[in-house]
Image: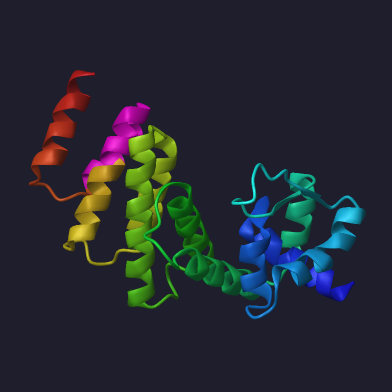
Amino acid sequence: PGNTRHCLEMASAIGEQFTVNLLTKLCYETETESLMASQLRPAVGLGLLITLPVVDYSELIQYQFAHPRIRALVYGGMDEGEKQKFHLKIASLLTEGSRPNGAKLLQIADHLNAATDPIESDPERRAEVAHFNLLAARETLRQGVFQQSYKYCRSGLTLIQDTSTPIYLDLCQCAAEAAFFCGDFEQLDRVLAGAPAHNSTLAEIRKRAAVV
């Protein structure tokens, strides 16, 4: 059915797994989760989606695409403009409520990156996305996922045009730390070459890299 196909497209923009609550807000805003579940039932019957087990009633009902290729096929059939619109709305919905952290923070950064063109986006949008990339980079650095942290830093740095801003320095520092802990000294040299020269944190990283 057309409604089911439309819901699957938006679900594919969310990711491999998604909650009925988030998909309902994304698709209908004013409709109920029970209506959304009925829209997804044909996809479950065809084996395109599976329902994830709920441990207790406090948890949100979640679905998962039965195979990554199914999700990729649905997502790949969408118009690029539609993808950006969905990713931006998903990021907006995820920022509602309490201050995001952990996995939700990374999701927001991922969706904003998918929705943002570094060249065409306005300066205010670029600054917002760079900020979330910095937060995601710090979160993954704290978790010890250094390669992912570096990628968030690079995504943020591509959005910054004014290299004299504090966020540019913060992203450089985080990128340098991530590259150092990855042992990727080629990337570290690249970061340091584009970073401000007189900075104590970066100078310390230069010293540590020199003796490794």
Left or right of residue 21: residue 153: left
The magenta-colored residue range is 176-193
Up/down of 186 relative to 150, above or below: above
Where residue 147 appears, x then y in whole percent?
42, 36
Where residue 164 appears, x then y in whole percent?
16, 62
Which sits in the foreground, 100 or 145? 100
Residue 43 visible from this viewpoint: yes
Give the position of the C terminus as an image quadrant. Answer: top left
Please check the rendered image and state whether residue 143 is part of the magenta-colored stretch, yes or no: no
Left or right of residue 158: residue 49: right
Q: Residue furthest bottom?
A: 30
Up/down of 141 relative to 89, above or below: above
Please check the rendered image and state whether residue 181 is part of the magenta-colored stretch, yes or no: yes
Residue 158 visible from this viewpoint: no
Where residue 66 appears, x then y in whole percent?
80, 46
The structure residue drawn at horizontal position 43% and vertical position 71%, both measured from the top left corner, is 119
